[in-house]
Amino acid sequence: MAGWSEKVLDIDLNTQTYKTYPLDMEMARLFVGGRGLGARLLWDMVGPEVDPLSPENVLIFTNGPLTGTGYQTSNRFSVSTKSPLTGTVLDANSGGFWGMQFKKAGYDVMIIRGKSEKPVWIEIKYGVITFHDASELWGMRVFDLTKKLEQNNNKRNVLCIGPAGENLSRIASIMNDRERALARGGPGAVMGSKNLKAIVVEGKDRPVIHDPERFKFLLYETRKLLAASPLTSQALPEFGTVVLMNIMNNIGALATRNHQQTQFEGAEAISGEELTEKYLVKNASCWACPIGCTRMSKTGKVEGEGPEFESTWAFGAQCGIDDLPAIIEANSLCNDLGLDTISVGSTIACAMELSEKGYMDSDLRFGRSDQLAPTIEAIAYRRDVGSDLADGSLRLATKYGHSELSMSAKGLEFPAYDPRGMQGQGLLYATSNRGGCHMRGNMVGPEVLGLPKMIDRFQVQGKSSFVILHQNVSAAIDSLVLCKFTNMGVADEYFARVLSTVTGIQYDTGELTRVGERVWNLERLYNLREGFSRTDDTLPPRLLNEAPTDGPSQGWVVQLEPMLKEYYRGRGWDENGVPRPQKLEELKLADLLVRN
Amino acid sequence: MVDKRIYEMFREIGRDLYSANMISSHGGNMSIRLGDRVVIKRRGAMLGNLKEHDLIETRLDKNDSGVALASTELLVHRTVYMNTPALAIVHCHPRTAIAFSLSRDELVPIDNEASYLLKKIPVVTEEFASGTPEMAKKVANALKNYKIIMLRGHGSFATGQTLDEAFHWSSTLEESCQIELAAKLINEPFIEYRKMSESYNKF
Amino acid sequence: MPTVKLYANLRKLAGTKELSTTGATVGAVLNELVKWNPALRDVVLENGGLRPHIVITLNGHNITDLGTPVMEQDIIAIFPPIAGG
């Protein structure tokens, strides 16, 4: 067939052996690839009895039928597992070049099971799979390791964990191509618990495209659309994602000092404009991407990729810090140690509030930019205060008797958007299957940027319809696997057509959205099976009860109850948030219930 | 009770449709989806001059009392919502587009804006072009893959996340058809200015 | 006089981050702005209205109606089409 490689690589670390077998194409039709396929396989492999850091958990790396075809941003890939941070279903996706090479290696899926007795790294080179002893490499930081394993963007790509993953920090990331990250939910800890240090890929296969003529046409149209959209052709390449800092602050939706305020007086100092003016060397892009939103920054101490908006916010406004060089250095440090910048920044902020209020005995204080680097190091090595912070803000805050001060949902720390300034975002955070996350249906498009059209960010009635649609579309894009920034210039009707053109299977726009809805419901079933329920679809009391006292969002709290009610009904779920049998029939998920 | 902001949006777009000559006094229809409910124009109301009581809220999947007051086209709207990701529907009667739909099975724009945004507008046809389940299904099916379609002789159906998005497609379509009509009057050889335009009808 | 704050590439075009300008409505303020900074005109305005995806906030609240009245202490922020994650 076209698009998919139709092969699965199944690795057993217990015995350091592997087997390959055909991909279930019926499953592939329904779930496509990436996040969708990963979730479906995870459903079969990892049940509620499995501890995420035990050998029985799995890591499922997936790409999609579009990966490696050369369609714009067809470089992304995904990892699925049960999250050690939240206990929910987890997928994380990343850009760069590794995904493209993984596809060239000739597989759609790579499953990693069990645990190696001793540290190991895996090399996949032109179909030959080799297990190498990683005892000498264990302890190495990401930058050095990536270099040592001979990273070459277009030919040989390194995916690895740093010390944070080795030390099973539940906010550890998996890094690829040096500074790209599979960041959220602690996948780095899962990899560390398996004693797996790195996976290096080199491949030669090229995906087959069913209709090359039509593909060329869609490629051309997409190029035209991305060039015409000022967002993808000017804003992102020039200022990067940090361009959002000033606008979020201006409208009073920039979480500050652990969500105590919704505006940060230092926003300008850590804005995209400031970054471009003072610390940007140039922009860069992932494979097959014309947008080029990646920042290459330089300060007196570091030079490298980033920072992104969320990272800048997490160490910036959230910690009350306006020292941009210190933030850039903190971001670089997280990349080198293999840590999720959002969770780290927000956990430090939580610790700052706990300490300032006297609930926790530490000298962490808001505004102390000098504390960032040492605290991040401490987290990666579980030293001193790091031993408290290494497992995220919820465990930290709970330990000191104030779990309500963890700004998270289902244990995953929120990103920058304070939902008291964006009602839809609040509903998104509360219902996201992997926890408090913005990438699962970001409402910044319609609620702030007017994409595709502006909607009232404070309106509650009808808001759930948008959240549901954006969640479904995001899930579909995550299953293709493409970068969501393409969607800023190109409507999803193009993605449906590209998918059909590449695979030869007819997907219309509605069917593609349906894939997303199917994935969403499957993830929901997974979490329900794990024991999550309606009571977990919630937000911290601060966001539900404490309104900002000034700024444009003054007086607003998240009106979760009415939105959630409307949301469950809109999704075809019952009043407890459980998908109704009719909905599961419709989505062809009914047979999964047999095991439930 | 429908939020005032929703009413204002309906009223503005309705007025714009009427002043753009895309509906007659009482023709056309608009709706939005609110979770598992639909807000639609009351039967007999004037889109160009909507009052608050002209908006009816009713269930998406089956009848409730709201249905007594809702537009006769409620079935189409519901069917579209049940079968596509649409959150808003604008149905209007763009004159030139309707004229072209009488002789073509698809409209492929020649102007820049519509080539860019729409590429191709399918024309579907149904004997009873109003209010029947067959017509509703046909329209909904076509809208699964295109954001705006024509029902031959009747009018356009456009979907979007918001009413103004659906209105955008409708307005662009009519503009495109008027340009094509003018080109036909001018009747001079067409100088192709777009690359790969021969593929538009395969969109 | 109300304050106008500019962001992203608008700063380079206008040569400044912030300025004060007269105007009783948002539309009037914008007209004054482009009069003194012609480089901004084509970026911000189109056919007498806002170009698509330009975001204008008045004291942090999104504005689409250019007839919205403006007070002395008000802050108008103008963002060119921007995006992020």
Image (tube, coloured by chain):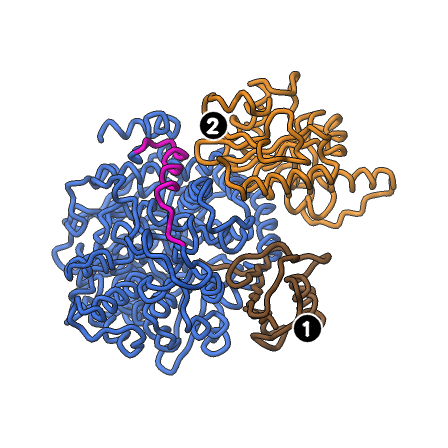
Chain colours: A blue, B orange, C brown
Q: Which mark is residue A477?
A: none
**Is the residue marked by circle 1 packed among few (<14), some (14-19), or many (20+) residues within 10 Å?**
few
* Left or right of A327 on screen, residue B158: right
| Identity, as a three-letter code, of the amino acid under mark 1 | Asn
Q: Residue B173, image x and y in percent?
A: 69, 39
The numbered mark 2 sits on a residue in which chain?
A: B
Q: Is residue A467 above or below residue B130?
A: below
Q: Residue B135, image x and y in percent?
A: 59, 21
- Tag 1 and tag 2 share a subunit: no
Q: Is residue A538 above or below residue A319?
A: above
Q: Which mark is residue B60?
A: 2
Instruction: Tell me the element at label 1.
Output: loop
Instruction: Give the magenta range.
Output: A556-575
Question: Which part of the image, by quadrant, shows the N terminus of chain A?
Answer: top left
Q: Is residue A3 at least partly visible in the picture?
A: no
Question: Which part of the image, by quadrant, shows the C terminus of chain A?
Answer: top left
Q: Residue furthest bottom?
A: A300
